Image (cartoon, rainbow, N blue to C red):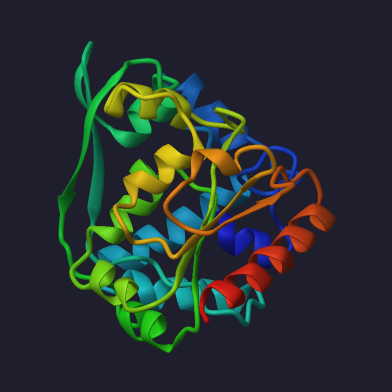
Amino acid sequence: DTVMYTLAGLADEERGWGLAGETFAGLGMVKRYGGPGWFGLGDRDLATHLLRSEALRAGEPLSAITARLCTALGIVHPILPMSDAPIATMIETTEEGTLPFQRWFVQRRAEPSVRAVHFEGGRTPAPGIIPAIEACDVVVLGPSNPYVSIDPILCLDGVREALSRKPVVALSPIVGGAAIKGPLATMIRDLTGEAASAGAVARHYRGLLRAMVVERGDEGTVVTIPVLGASTVMRSRDDRERLAREVLAFSSEAAR
């Protein structure tokens, strides 16, 4: 949804999720009725969820629903969900047992320490996923949490194998030993016992990467693949466009 809202020019760029100018009257009424209010779903965002849930109950696949929503928002770039089948990310914690990802991340604010992450559900990629990988010149992994954002995609049947035949370049989500936002730095420590670094992220991908883009000064943590040091903290649209061009230029070199 964040990708869809961003490409449609509707995203709340300061908050980093949801829609700009969002209101939360619906959630406020849920709370007044005594319902759960820990998941911050805005009023216009609620429309996306209601229409999608209705279509899913009617048997429409998620990939088709996503395409229809994107068309309605005027998005011409293809956005593919990773799978039409439900796949849940489960967080095994030391203090509170196994929690669904959203409860651990949103309701519990990622406070319980993590012992392991596993996925429950199907393993079939959505239509178009493998052909999209096969058709591309290079694959760029964005600066997302590898455990809970990238690994769910890599676990799908055939995806990692398809990626292994392509140049894959990752943008490090760790800057100077810390995550810009989110619990990744703590997760690396909990799951591997080592300090958070761009190198720790590269090692997690276990030979999948051809090269990596890191924050300037972090180059020394990545020792087995080519690395580009850049200004990777994106505070504006200009920052994002500049970094995207740098990553693509570097990726083209790595693909040779």
Left or right: 131 with respect to 249?
left
Q: Is residue 92 visible?
A: yes
User: 237 or 199, which lies in front?
Assistant: 199
Examine the image and state in which quarter residue 75 appears.
bottom right
Examine the image and state in which quarter residue 126 appears.
bottom left
User: 57 or 237, which lies in front?
Assistant: 237
User: 137 or 50, which lies in front?
Assistant: 137
Q: Is residue 81 above or below residue 50?
A: below
User: 32 or 157, which lies in front?
Assistant: 157
Query: Measuring 36% from the left and 58% from the top, which residue is drawn there?
Result: 53
Circle count: 0
Left or right: 243 with respect to 198?
right
Examine the image and state in which quarter residue 251 appears.
bottom right
Q: Position of residue 122 (x, y in %)?
A: 15, 60
Q: Position of residue 242 (x, y in %)?
A: 79, 61
Q: Is residue 228 above or below residue 34?
A: below
Query: Measuring 24% from the left and 72% from the top, which residue is drawn there?
Result: 161
Q: Is residue 35 visible?
A: no
Q: Position of residue 144 (x, y in %)?
A: 49, 47
Left or right: 123 with respect to 60?
left
Q: Is residue 117 above or below residue 213?
A: above
Outermost residue on the top side: it is 95
Q: Position of residue 152 (x, y in %)?
A: 29, 53
Outermost residue on the right side: it is 238
Left or right: 107 with respect to 44?
left
Query: Measuring 72% from the left and 64% from the top, which residue is drawn there?
Result: 246
